[in-house]
Amino acid sequence: METTAAAQGGANMILFLFLLAMVVLMLWSGRGQKKREQERQAKVDALQKGEQVILSGGIVGTVAGFKDNMLEVKIAENVKLTVLKTAVVGFVNEMQPVNQQGDAK
């Protein structure tokens, strides 16, 4: 009976360590994502007229104005969209040109 109890105790320890590792990984990965989101939000809050942005649908446009929590984005001549600030997923000035070998310039 002692070997069964010892085996069960060892299995419980392995399960405990596995669960502990999962919790640590979840907290660690969530921290990085939260930091990136805060950086993106700070950049969105600091946007100025004339800056180019990438919207969640892949649309690239130029900031033309602000209204509360919305942006007015010019995407073509005489064409403006009003979108939520949360629709901004990227900034054109951060894009790195890539040459044909796949290396960043």
Image: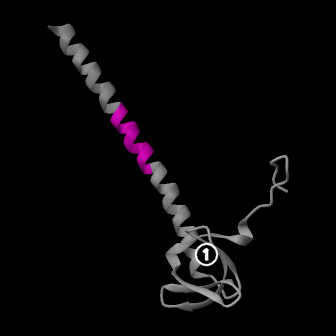
Q: Residue at x 55, y 68 (%)?
A: 56
Q: State which region is magenta.
A: 18-27
Q: Name the residue under label 1.
A: 43
67, 14: nearer the viewer: 67
Q: Residue at x 67, y 88 (%)?
A: 49
Q: In which quarter of the image is the C terminus?
A: bottom right
Amino acid under label 1? Lys
Q: Where is residue 13 in the image (x, y as percent from the top left)?
A: 30, 26
83, 5: nearer the viewer: 83
Q: Quadrant of the N terminus?
A: top left
Question: Where is 17 relative to 10, above or below?
Answer: below
The residue at the far left in this view is 1
Q: Where is residue 8 in the image (x, y as percent from the top left)?
A: 22, 18
In which quadrant of the rendered view does residue 9 lie? Answer: top left
41 with respect to 13 (left or right): right
Q: Which residue is drawn at 21% across and 8% down?
A: 3
Question: Where is 19 relative to 3, above or below?
Answer: below
Judging from the image, what secondary structure is the residue with disc 1 in? helix
72 drawn magenta: no
75 with respect to 35 (left or right): right
Magenta segment, principal secondary structure? Answer: helix
Q: Where is residue 92 in the image (x, y as percent from the top left)?
A: 71, 71
